[in-house]
Image: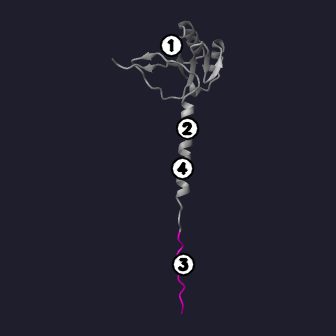
Amino acid sequence: MMIERRKKISVELNIAPLIDVVFQLLVFFALTSYFVANPGIEVSLPGAESTVDVQKQHTIVFITKEGSVFCNSKKVEPAALRNMLQALPSHSKTVILKSDESVSLGLVVKVIDSIKQAGIRDLVIATTKKEAK
């Protein structure tokens, strides 16, 4: 009587292509996150000794040194800013104001007034941290 023995099935997993794909995904996300974090609007922020990091979802309003106003990288007139902010979803009702340090105070006050008229309660004015002397 002959007993048939089972054949062992060997399973091999070639991991080299998997490592290549993971590395390419890592490079892709590292590069895209850099471009998302650095918008193309150049603003020289004023310095302050006390700063706090903001960790919520938010809307960013820029005021450039030429006096142009941008809301989330979209150019708007200061008068139309209020309507644009009122149309925002409720989860992004925190506004970060990034104004160039050479902008006149009158324009900054006008923009802050538009933000407050839009019903925004959380307004953060962005600054850079000064080195302690």
Specify the quadrant of the image occupied by residue 74. Answer: top right
Task: Give the number of the disc on residue 31.
Answer: 2
Who's the residue at 61% across and 21% down the image? 71
Q: Position of residue 87 (x, y in %)?
A: 65, 22
Name which of mark 4 and mark 2 comes first in the sequence.
4
Amino acid residing under circle 3: Lys
Evaluate if marks 3 and 2 touch, with contact meaning CB atoms under 8 Å apart.
no
Q: Nearer the viewer, residue 3 or 42?
A: 42
The residue indicated by pointer 1 is 101
Q: CA distance from mark 3 to mark 4?
A: 35 Å
Q: Residue 7 got which mark? A: 3
Residue for badge 4: 22
The x and y percentages for residue 76 are 65, 17
Label 3: element kind:
loop
Q: Secondary structure at mark 1?
A: loop
Quarter of the image for the N terminus: give it: bottom right
Residue span colored magenta: 1-10
Quick one: label 3 or label 1, which is nearer the N terminus?
Answer: 3
Separation (CA) of disc 3 from disc 2: 49 Å
